[in-house]
Amino acid sequence: MGSDQDNLSAGIGRRSLLAAGAAAAAAALATPARAQAPASPSNIRDRNSILIRGATIVSMDPAVGDLVRGDILIENGAIWSIGTNIAAPTDALIIDGSGKIACPGFVNGHVHLPQTLQRGLSADHSFGDYFRTVVLRYSNRMTPTDVALGVRAGGLQEMAAGTTTIVDWNREVISPDHADAAVDGHFASGARAVLCYTVPLRSQDGATPNHARMLAHARTLKAGRLASETGRVRLGVCLPGPDFMALEPALADLAMLRELGVLTAFHCGAPIYAARKKRVVATLAEQGFIDHNTQLVHANDLDLDEYKIAADKGASLASTPEAEMHMGHGFSAIGRARDAGLRFSLGTDIPSAFGGGMLSQMRAAYSADLALRNAAAFRDTGKAPEVKPWSARAMLEALTIGAARAINMDRIIGSLAPGKRADILLFDGGSAGLAPVLDPVGTIVLQATPADIDTVIVDGRVMKSGGRLTDPELPGIVDAVKARAAAMVEAATR
């Protein structure tokens, strides 16, 4: 995941943080409890200058390093400086970071976000049940208004759990009106997002009446509302791919999408797919259809050399551990991706079944891969490995800068460094679940829950403060979600 020098620097930083954490824990025993923080100001979401004062900073940037007690100055949505004793601009919002851990916001590399309206409906679904129920009875019947509502509500839930960037594989975008509504929803939610515009499945006779319309509208979005390379919402595309259709039409889809030059995602490499093709990644690479914009979703059952082929072509993997293990895809492939040098991100996949945010997905992937490696070591040597093959910092990287690399956004997000957009989490190190914080990285990776996330900042806007979302329209959004979800269930069960 990094050079030996990076690993050495991380080790030194970790020892410093451990020593400081122990000292802070001891001091806390002799320090009276602090009074409850005052209520957030009403205009907290609309401040151009923000200074986070005195936090433990886990930057995920080797040049910045980790600070035991540091400040972060945000100006106009970007990180202006990181250091100690930074002077506060006269109009700055001051956030007290003492006792808190600051780290980059998390990236959700794969989620079908409008299915927030079906939350919990797939708890007992098999893969087939999910498609027959959620996709065919709900996704295919959503109105543009439904899509906008699901995207906005889903974005709020993601931010509450610490996700600041979402790759929304939006299979509910079935028309230009639906796509426009999804864009509206993403802008309204406040989260950073890649909206993956759905490429419809080609008909049996090869006719593609909807493809030209979709492509023309995608071009319009990329040239207009989603034109900015650093904008909070950007364009991607998602398509059925060769494991769901004949190879030639799948190649035609990929050729058609090249001109857009955006993240191009498709599910592949799972044994449960009806049109599963062995060596599909090798085949696509030979045909010139794997590059830095290719996101392979799931890819649990590729031949081992295909992960290296994909890595050499610059592609990435999106793994959704809970969904994959529940629904028969297999174990997460992040270990094979890591060994091959393939960029990867993690995702929550279907809100109709899985919630809890990225911390739970990371722990599922981490535990499963360690268990597989431990079992292999016992089989081969009769004993467990002496050293964990993954570190906690490597797993935090998988949610932050590593995931940002995987979706081609590491220039603007994924670490805390001057010039990057201000997507920042503050964990409350004084919570009952986290105190004492002896190892900040380990605390985040293996101890923290969404309830411990005190503050979420996206693009320089405070979206969660004091453990509560700051959107003043939240109660109305929740009411609308409940009403529309109930109506959709009634319609689907008639």
Image (tube, rainbow, N blue to C red):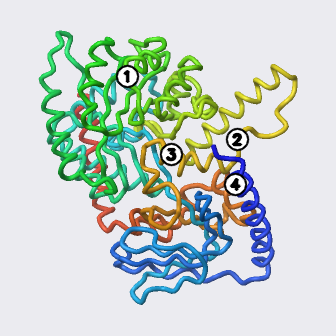
Name the amino acid, label 1.
Gly
Q: Is residue 61 left or right of residue 41?
A: right
Please report whichever mark, 2 or 1, sits nearer to the chain's N-terminal start.
Answer: 1
Residue 12, percent across and down?
Answer: 76, 60
Camera-near label (3 vs 4) is 3
Which residue corresponds to mark 4?
Answer: 442
Which residue corresponds to mark 2?
Answer: 390
Q: Residue at x 37, y 56 (%)?
A: 191
Name the amino acid, label 2.
Trp
Which residue corresponds to mark 1?
Answer: 288
Name the amino acid, label 4.
Gly
Image label count: 4
**Marks 1/3: CA distance?**
24 Å
Camera-near label (1 vs 4) is 1
**Marks 1/4: CA distance?**
41 Å
Residue 199, percent across and down?
Answer: 25, 29
Q: Are marks 1 and 4 in contact (CB under 8 Å)?
A: no
SS of the residue at dot 2? loop
Q: Are marks 3 and 2 in contact (CB under 8 Å)?
A: no
**Marks 4/2: CA distance?**
12 Å
Q: Residue at x 52, y 47 (%)?
A: 358
Quarter of the picture containing the N terminus is top right
